[in-house]
Image (cartoon, rainbow, N blue to C red):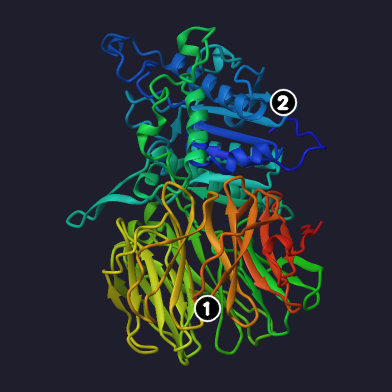
Amino acid sequence: MSSPAIKVPADLPAPHMQICAHTDDDLYFMTPDLLQSVRAGVPVVSVYLTTGEADGLNLASDDPARKTATPDYPGYTAARQHGIRAAYAAMTTGSRRAPWVRETLDVSEGVVAEINTLEEGRVTLIFLNLRTCVALPDQKVLHLWSNKITELGTLRPSDSPIPARGDGRPLTRDGVISTLADLLTAYRPAVVRVMNPDPDRTRYDSATDTITYCDNSDHTAAALFALAALKVYEERDQSHRPVVESYSGYCNKLQPDNLSPAAAAEKFHYLAIYGGEDGHECTKGPGQCGDRPLGNRAFNRYYGQSTTHRWRGSTTWLQPRGDGRLTAFAVLGGRPVLWTQDTPGGDSWSGPETLGLWPDGDEARCLPRLDAVRDGQGRIHVFAVRALIALDPEEHRREVMHLQQDTPDGRFGAWQSLSSPHDRHNAIRRRALGMPTALTTSSGHPQIVLRNFGTGLSARTATDGGWGPWTDLHGGTLEGASAITLRNGHSEIYATTKTSMLRWHQPKPDGPLARDYATQLARPAGSTTLLEQTDGRLVMFSRQPGTGWLLAHRQLEPGGAWDTQPQLVDTTPGFGSVAATPLAGDSAVVLVQRRDDGTLAFSRQPLDGSPFSTEWAPCGSGPFAHTQAAALDAEGRLVVTTIGIDAQLHVITVRPTDEGVNAWPVRELSTHLPPA
């Protein structure tokens, strides 16, 4: 790709790139992560595959004029693009009317796209303008991906700088992949945000083995094209591997509201600007003031109240090795990597280095979540999901991968496939695979559990003779199970259902898991954090839906019922999973959470049954990608790690003292650069 329009200022950090189907997908599904990137001064590049022109009527859904209006597809496309420019201008400058430079961009196969730039190159919007007209039902982006159609035409929006002769010129499947790969090469982003390639279902017909997905097929296609382009790009430039994050679309409506009122209101504020119904005086024709069918009704769509990462991160990716050094595990550019302390308790780290031997020449990618656990001998085991995307849906693969140390201080060997509970089934079931959660059984062997196609859990357990078969634990859950093995050898697993919490527990160590539907615990907003108190009772930390507050529940007795009345631990809203690491003596634990503004805060909480603390202290700037992890190092310091917005490991150290946490010394220790 060669065009004078692509200018990446040398004095700015590597950008974050969003690859979306429609002009509001990044606002709806990738915020607040996107908003925090903008506020941190990170350049952002949003690429929109389609025009999203729908029925061509840029009128409110309840406007009587819709009955007699004539479709204006170029006009409605232009209105949506005006809306997204206004939203980004307001997000970046505070004014929806900040000026843009609008230019053309030559992409693959002779197609001319439009590129818009704001604020010294800090915000770039690229419109490929593939048509998605409802009057042409066979002309779908997903059909282009699967080769049901060989090409898809483009549409020149009204008032676009694209020459009229470029209107309608098509892109092929390879052309879309090539264009996206060229854009990745030009911008070399540190973070790439994509939609969900594997949406949840709303209905399954077992008689016909067909499924109804809860998402727009354009979202799915955009994610598949993005992942294919990333593969091309990562093969071109193996020295630069980005962080990849995937977001659920309409499937958010199936999840509990995980944004605080303030975070949700901010999201809907920018969506109202996009919709042209934010109370501003429209100085242009009504069709140029935004997406009027959306208007200020974004909240009524029910899928914006949450922001859900498809590949939800774990908090276990920081682990101590046998010699006392800490090791951090992550995924960059679709391949697992690790960083390691140079000395036990030291301040310098080495990495990133390749983690284990991934299958040579593998066409698949490693999804971003890595779950790690130490076995009874102290060896670290790492679990991942291998994802192969393909033109033919039957060729899609999702399988669990396992890696282990040969000794507690040894090397990591080759990744081993643990397959999937649905290996003998079609791709519909394979693609529904959840992310693995690992624990260690009383016999010292690792066990993994994950959500299966039936929405229950499946488990696989290692033995002295190797890995046993997949076992269906049944149940009906949302994604994000939590697990713990108690000091008495019993394991417990908790997962969120549509209304509450479901529990699996062992009547005896290493015995079969029994289900308990009667926990009477309220449904949390995401994965919970489980810890064992000194008296053998469990304590659970969770987020309250709709507030982002952090709550705590305790069991009434070991292995027994729960006190269903939660205790407030923090009323400052936060987002996502909470990392936890017990302090020396196991009578207290340090929790580390992400606040609404993307920064980190920590708290010391008792494990002896005494009252919970509401004291929290800041321990690191943000924002960052995925989730945070925490562990104690050989010097007794709390070490918190994040993958920063620069796709590098960031390390924070906290020195625990006998004083309140606001007096604990905190250092944002270092940034660990990738190899040149």
* Mark toward the start of the polypeptide (2 vs 1): 2
Q: Amino acid at mark 2?
A: Glu
Element class at badge 1:
loop
Residue 271 locus on image (x, y percent)? 48, 29
Is residue 126 shown above or below 465? above
Image location of residue 632, percent across then percent down: 68, 74
Q: Nearer the viewer, residue 280 or 474?
A: 280
Residue at (64, 26) in percent of width and height = 106
The amino acid type found where label 1 is placed reads Asp
Frontmost residue, 18 versus 274: 274
How crowded is the residue under tag 1: few (<14 C-alpha within 10 Å), some, or many (20+)? Answer: some
Can residue 332 be seen in the rendering of this structure?
no
Residue 20 location in percent, x, y? 51, 37
Residue at 65% across / 72% down in the picture? 631
Distance in Å between CA atoms under marks 2 and 1: 54 Å
* Residue 402, x across and y down, in percent: 53, 75
For mark 2, give the secondary structure. loop
Classify the position of the C terminus by image quarter: bottom right
Compared to residue 338, the image places residue 272 above or below, namely above
Q: Are marks 2 and 1 in contact (CB under 8 Å)?
A: no
Image-based side of 638 in relation to 175, left or right: right
Q: Nearer the viewer, mark 2 or mark 1?
A: 1
Against 658, residue 541 (above or below) is above
Please state if 174 lies on the left or on the right of 566 as rendered: right
Residue bearing mark 1: 608
Outermost left residue:
207
Q: Which mark is on residue 621?
A: none
Q: Quadrant of the N terminus?
A: top right
Residue topped by disc 2: 119
Asked if one can make out residue 623 in the rendered structure from this viewpoint, the answer is yes
Snapshot quadrant of residue 62:
top left
